[in-house]
C-alpha cells in the first residue's frame, strides 16, 4: 500500500484541522513508499524501533512526535539523532498524530472516558479534554480504587489531591499533561480531574480550592492510544493488503516501589 494513501487515511481519522501551532503532528520521517506492515505505538524508543525491525514494519505510527522541537542537526550522539539514524538504516518511516488525536471525537480523551464507563461525555470548549459523569456517585477514595481497576493500574501509585471523603460525580479528563484545565474544571463544577504530569504548584492550587485531582501519569492516561488508533485504522483499511500491529513494548519509565 502506498504511504501517501495511508497518510490520507490517518488524517481522515485524525484530521490536521485539529493541529496546533506549537505541536508537530504529521510525517516525521519518510524513507519509503511501499508499506505492507504498520506498527502503532505511543512513542519511539530504541526498543520500539527494534520491535519494528524484528516484525518487519515499514511504518511506525506514534502519538508523541519523534521530532517535537526544531533540530539543527541529525547527530547520532543525540537521542533523536540516534533514532533517526536507526530508522533510516532500516527503511522505516514515522508518522505522529498528537494533539489532533487528543481532540477528535474518537480520540484519547473520549476513549478513556468510555473505558471508565462515564456517561454524558462533552468536550471542554477551546481545550483538549472532556467532562462526563459517573453512573453512580462515589467517594474519592473508592473512585481511585475503581479507576486503577478500569485503567489497569493495579499496583501502581497514583498521586491524589483532595479529601478522600469527597463525593465524586462530575469528572474532567485530559490525557497526558492537563494541568491547564484545572481552572476550567473548577469553573464547570467538576469534582475531580484525571490527568498526568501534575506539578507541585498546580496541586497546591487545586487543594486551596478544595478541588480533587488524580495524577494517573502521562503514560497511564495515554497508554491506550495504540489499541484505539490501530482499531480505527484497521476499520478503514479492511479491504487493503496491509497488516497493522500494536506494539507490545512497555515504555513506562517509572516503577512503583
Image: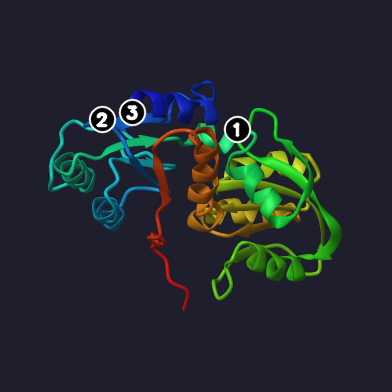
Residue sticking out furthest to the right: 136
- First in sequence: mark 1 vs mark 3: 3
Q: In the rendered structure, are the residues bearing label 2 and label 3 in contact, judged by CB atoms less than 8 Å apart?
A: yes
| Figure check: 7 above or below 168 | above
Where residue 178 appears, as percent x and y from the top left, is 58, 45
- Among the 4 quarters of the image, the one containing residue 204: bottom right
- Residue tagged 3: 3
Q: What number is the disc on residue 104?
A: 1
Marks 1 and 3, how far apart in space?
22 Å
Percent of width and height locating residue 166: 81, 64
Q: Nearer the viewer, residue 25 or 239?
A: 239
106 and 132: which is toward the camera: 106
| Residue 28 sits in quarter | top left
- For marks 1 and 3, give the one nearer the viewer: 3
Q: Are marks 1 and 3 in contact (CB under 8 Å)?
A: no
Q: Which residue is mark 2?
A: 30
Neighbourhood count class around disc 3 (C-alpha, 10 Å): few under 14, some 14–19, many 20 upward: some
Number of other residues with Cα within 10 Å of mark 1, as a class: few under 14, some 14 to 19, many 20 or more: some
- The picture quadrant where one finds residue 189 is top right
Q: Residues within 10 Å of mark 2 (few under 14, many from 20)?
A: some
Which secondary structure, mark 1?
A: loop
Amino acid at each position: 500500500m502506498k504511504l501517501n494513501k495511508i497518510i490520507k487515511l490517518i488524517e481522515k481519522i485524525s484530521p490536521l484541522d485539529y493541529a496546533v501551532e506549537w505541536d508537530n503532528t504529521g510525517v516525521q520521517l519518510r524513507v519509503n513508499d511501499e508499506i505492507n506492515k504498520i506498527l502503532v505505538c505511543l512513542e519511539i524508543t530504541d526498543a520500539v524501533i527494534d520491535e519494528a525491525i524484528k516484525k518487519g514494519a515499514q511504518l511506525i505510527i506514534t502519538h508523541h512526535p519523534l521530532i517535537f522541537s526544531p533540530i539543527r542537526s541529525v547527530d547520532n550522539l543525540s537521542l533523536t539523532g540516534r533514532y533517526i539514524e536507526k530508522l533510516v538504516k532500516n527503511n522505516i518511516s514515522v508518522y505522529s498524530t498528537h494533539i489532533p488525536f487528543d481532540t477528535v471525537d474518537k480520540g484519547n480523551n473520549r476513549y478513556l472516558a468510555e473505558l471508565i464507563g462515564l456517561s454524558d461525555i462533552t468536550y471542554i470548549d477551546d481545550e483538549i479534554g472532556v467532562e462526563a459523569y459517573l453512573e453512580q456517585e462515589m467517594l474519592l477514595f473508592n473512585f481511585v480504587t475503581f479507576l486503577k481497576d478500569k485503567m489497569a493500574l493495579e499496583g501502581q501509585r497514583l498521586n491524589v489531591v483532595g479529601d478522600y471523603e469527597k463525593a465524586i460525580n462530575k469528572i474532567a479528563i485530559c490525557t497526558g499533561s492537563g494541568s491547564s484545565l484545572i481552572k476550567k474544571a473548577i469553573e464547570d463544577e467538576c469534582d475531580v480531574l484525571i490527568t498526568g504530569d501534575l506539578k507541585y504548584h498546580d496541586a497546591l492550587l487545586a487543594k486551596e480550592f478544595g478541588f480533587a485531582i488524580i495524577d494517573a501519569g502521562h503514560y497511564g492516561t495515554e497508554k491506550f492510544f495504540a489499541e484505539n488508533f490501530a482499531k480505527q485504522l484497521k476499520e478503514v483499511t479492511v479491504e487493503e493488503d496491509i497488516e497493522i500491529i500494536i506494539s507490545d513494548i512497555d515504555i513506562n519509565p517509572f516503577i512503583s516501589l
